[in-house]
Structure formats: structure tokens, C-alpha cells
Image (cartoon, helix red, strand yellow):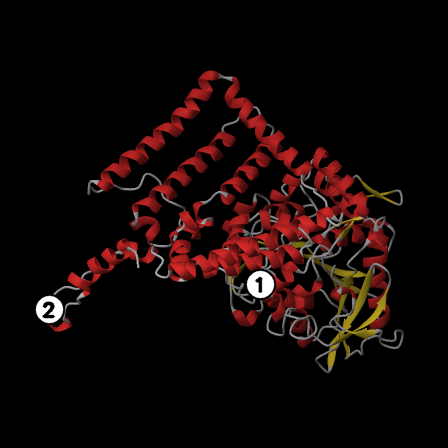
Amino acid sequence: MSETQKKHRQSAAGPEGATQPADRGAETTPRDPILNYIVENPEAFAENIAKMLAHANDALTAYVAPRMEGEAKAEYTDEINEWMRTLSRVGHYWLADPVRSIEAQARLANDWMELYAHAVRRLSGEPAPPVVEPDPSDKRFKDADWTTIQFFDFLKQAYLITTRWAEKLVDDTDDLDEHTKQKAAFYVRQLSAALSPSNFVLTNPELLRETASQSGENLAKGMKMLAEDMARGHGDLRVRQTDPEKFAIGKNMALSPGKVIAQNEICQVIQYAAQTPDVAKEPILIIPPWINKFYILDLNPEKSLIKWLCDHGHTVFVCSWVNPDERHRDKDFTHYMREGVLFSVDTALKAADTDRVDVVGYCVGGTLLAMTIAFMHRNGDNRINTATFLTAQVDFTHAGDLKLFVDKDQLAALERKMQAKGYLEGAAMAQAFNMLRANDLVWPYVVNNYIRGKDPFPFDLLYWNSDSTRMPAANHAYYLRNFYLENRFAKGELEVDGLKLSPHDIIVPVFNVATKEDHIAPAKSVFMGNKMFGGEARFVLTGSGHIAGIVNPPAKNKYQVWLDGDDRGSLEDWIKSAQEVPGSWWPIWHKWLGEHRSGERVSAREPGGSHFKPLEDAPGSYVRQRY
């Protein structure tokens, strides 16, 4: 044991390590918090550091080997160039004018001087309120030692001062167009998130205490996990957000009974088994996004929208998209419309032996569905009874942070990248979504896995989130160019088979669900699109975000729903005038469907009916495809 450790122990225990009797009424000497940061077993610490270095070599090998063998390629050149080009425009604005540059530097220097004065007052024992404090919702600095130990308090405040100064530089850059300014702000946020002192052992009190108490074992375990995840990604880091060994499709996920009754090279059509003696005449067909897999709507029996619908007397069909490869490179939005949505409509109506269907589109599946309904209307096809859109956009004017990744230069670079393989890897889209909330979906898992050395908590939603799918090159390019970049559908300029389509062509009754905290399909965007439909359109707002706000079973009694606001003004005006109801939107939708149906009931249907021979059990083989 070192002399320093002995002195600390003696100061905590009394002379020569003696403890004071508890019954003498003397106050117990408080434990010196510095003791929490001292490694008590230096030999074990040295061994674990050696293990950590060995695993670091494994991680480096896992990164380099696929590149040496040509399996993986460096694909970040375009992204780095975009970052540099965007941020250099901010730098040029401030450096071009010496007065402006000096003023900006003076603001930062003044804040740092205040922090220095604050530190001096604390050292001298004077009261010293903080110069800056983290946002109350920021979970990174919740540990008490970020405040009580001056070293960590100084680091925290220095980080907050500097990052907020950098963000303000972007806000005050006057010669940038709005899109470039949003990109610059996004890039600065990513850099700020990455450089947070909470992400490093020596600057995070929690991590430092854990490393000391475990003699570095956490670092050895964490580096081993890093090597495994690098190997699993074939040279690219695939950060685990949950334990993948705890979940399996068809075993503890996607359990609703049903059959695949038809398929083509784009999708499988699943019909679920009825759970009531009779059912509504009009079946429900769900068009999920192809960016993720459909079983988000059938995670488990407690969370399953599909099961809930079957239990409440509906016949449910789902379009399960293929996880594409190079064979699908030329399949664009119109192919997904014809071979996906229209094929599924034909199949569902034939299997249900009826003439009208209620359709549901989730996220980008809803955008595709909207285009398809408009196309059907222009062709005199009236087989759609009602349309329900879940966090789906038809107008992309206010499409949120995802628009940051879409401009002419970035789209051209992405199209070049996709042409090499014929598709975009699912991990690329998953990474983009995660980066929108890096402080929640990236860095906490990096810290937990690779520094704390802890296995991530088993969570079905995060397993689904990591089960990403590819996007065919033609389809993804069509979507980004025609919707995100040029907003052709909202403008009435999207042309299919010589017909110009717009949301106004959707004249069937619409139930339109947005979520209040959605960062993918912002509520404002969905609300503005709701005004463009050509018929009755009921806008509904739910609490939470893109997934949790939709996958919200009534039994959980979580969140809330806003209904029946005045839609003549802004979203904010609508919310002020809306009725707030606790709980889930599912029963409200169920009631709405009943009001827009014939009211006729038929005997429970067998999957496939008399027209289709089931091909396999639900959830089918397409949803199980992983690359």
C-alpha cells in the first residue's frame, strides 16, 4: 500500500487506524471523498490495464483487417468534407471581420474569467454561485461530485461555457442560408456531445470511481466488448444498445398468430388469425415503413397493436417488406407502390372476400400510402374505405432535422455511394436517426459498454431499433429527392403514369396521428400536411415520440391525447384549443373506425380464405432477413 493511501486511511480512521466507539456520542469523521478515487489494489489494476491493451489490439485488428482484405472501405470522405465545408463558412464569417472576431473571442474570455474568479472564491471558502448550470433535463451531470468536487465542477462549467459559446456563434452567423445554418448547428451539437467530459474516464467522477473500485476491470471488459462489436460490424463499430441474445423473432417477439398468404420479391402479405367469433366487414391493412421492420407493431402481447386490433374484432393484414439486396437496386417508389401497397390491397380484399379496406400507413409507409391513395383516386379506384396515418408526412416543408442530410450535394454523394452496391446499408440510416439524439442514443451506450464494461439492459424496443434494414438505391433516392428535397407531392407536381398527384387527391376520411416529441416526423409537419387532404381529416396529437407515442397500449395508461382543436391556425393554436384526454389513442381510433364503416359484421375469417393457401406462419421469412 502506498504512503498516500496509508495517510488517507489514517485520516479517515483516526490515529493509527483506530475507530471511535459508537457509544461515546462523538461525531463520526466523514469519509474523505478523495478515497473513492484511489485504486486499492494496484496489482489487479496493472493486470486489467494489460488486458485492456490486449483487447485494444483485437479491436484495432478487427478494424484494419476488413480494410486490408477489401471487405470494408473508408466511406466517410464525403461526410467529412461536408462537415468541413459547412463549419468553415461559420469560421469565415467570424474571421473575415477583425472587430467581429475580437468581440466573439472577448465573450468567451469574459465567461472564462468569471469561471476562474468563481474557482478562486471556492478555494478560499467563499460562497460562489455557479457561472453556468446544465439544463435540468441533461442527465450527464446528475452525479453529486460534478458539483461538490471543485475539479469536476470546473470541468463541467468550462465545457458548458465553451459549447454554448460555439452554438451561439452559429446562431449569430448572419450570412448563412437557413439550411446551412441548421447543418452547422447540428454539427456543432455532435462535436459538443462527443467532447463532453462525461464521456471520458479521467474527467467523469462516476467513471473514475468505478474504475478505482473495480481496479480497472471495467476497462478490460469494455475494451473486450469494443473488439467484439467492431468484429460484428466487419470493421465498423456497431454499438450495442441492448443484449441481442435475449430476443428472437417468433420466440419472444412478433408472436401474434397468423399466416403469410402471398408474396412477391418486394413484400409478404400476412393475415392474422381472428380472435373474436365475428369481425367487421372491412379489414385493416397496415403499411409499415421499410426503413425498419414491421414488428414494432407486434413487439410482444402486451405492446402489440396487431394483437389489440384482432382482440377487438378486426381482420388485420400487414405488408412485410423484404430486406433488399443488390437484386432490388432499381426498385423505386412506384415499384413499392404497385408491388407493395397495391399488391397488398388486392390480396387483402380477395382474402377477406370484400370490396373495401381500411388502410394504415406508418412513417414513410404512410407517405407511400398517401401517394398510392392519390394515384388510386385519379384512376377511379375507390376500394379504400378510410386512411389512417401514423407519424407520416405528406408535406416536407417542416420535416425536421432529417432534412439536414438532404441537399443537392449530399444527395449526389449518397446516390454515388448507393450505386456501388445497389442499396444503402441499414446501419447508415440507424446511425443517422441515432445522431439526431446523440446524448440519448449514442454516448450513454458508448460509456456504459466500453468504459463501464456493462452489458446493455435487455430492451425489446432497442433490439428492434438495431434490427435495421437496407434501402434499395432507386427507392431511397426517389424518396429523398422527390419528397425531402423538392417536396413534389405537396406541390402537386409528383407525376406517376402521366398523372400529377397531390394530398388533395385523398378524399377518403383520414385519421392522422402525430406525436408531440417526434424528431423524425415533427408534429408541425404532420399538422400542416393534414390541411392539404381533400376530404375529412381528423388530426390527433399524442404524447411522447415517434415510437412510444404510437406503441402505447391502453392498459399501460401512459401519456395523453389531444383532440378536436381548431385547425385554422398554427399547431400551437390547435393545442391550446384542443381537448386533452389521458391514455392511449388506440380506443379513440377504434371508435372512429366504427363510425366510418358499414357496421356489418361477418364470421371470423381464416387466413387466406378460399383464395390463398398459406405459405408459412407469421411473422414470415422476410422479416427475419439480416445482413
Q: What's under tag 2, amino acid-wise?
A: Gly
Mark 1 nearby-residue class (10 Å; few <14, some 14–19, many ≥20): many
Q: Is residue 562 visible?
A: no
Q: Is residue 288 left or right of residue 432?
A: right
Q: Secondary structure at mark 1?
A: loop
Could you tell me which quadrant the N terminus lies in?
bottom left
In the picture as drawn, the residue positioned furthest to the left comes out as: 24
Classify 375 as above or below 316.
above
Viewer-nearest residue: 35 or 181: 35
Viewer-nearest residue: 157 or 286: 157
Classify 459 as above or below 528.
below
Residue beneath label 2, please? 25
Location of residue 134 in the rendering, given as x and y in whole percent from the top left corner: 39, 45
Q: How many marks?
A: 2
Location of residue 620 in the rendering, given as x and y in whole percent from the top left corner: 77, 70
Question: Residue at 56% of width from left, 43% of height from top?
Answer: 570
Q: What's under tag 1, amino acid-wise?
A: Thr
Which mark is drawn over residue 242?
1
Q: Secondary structure at mark 2?
A: loop
Q: Is residue 365 left or right of residue 301?
A: right
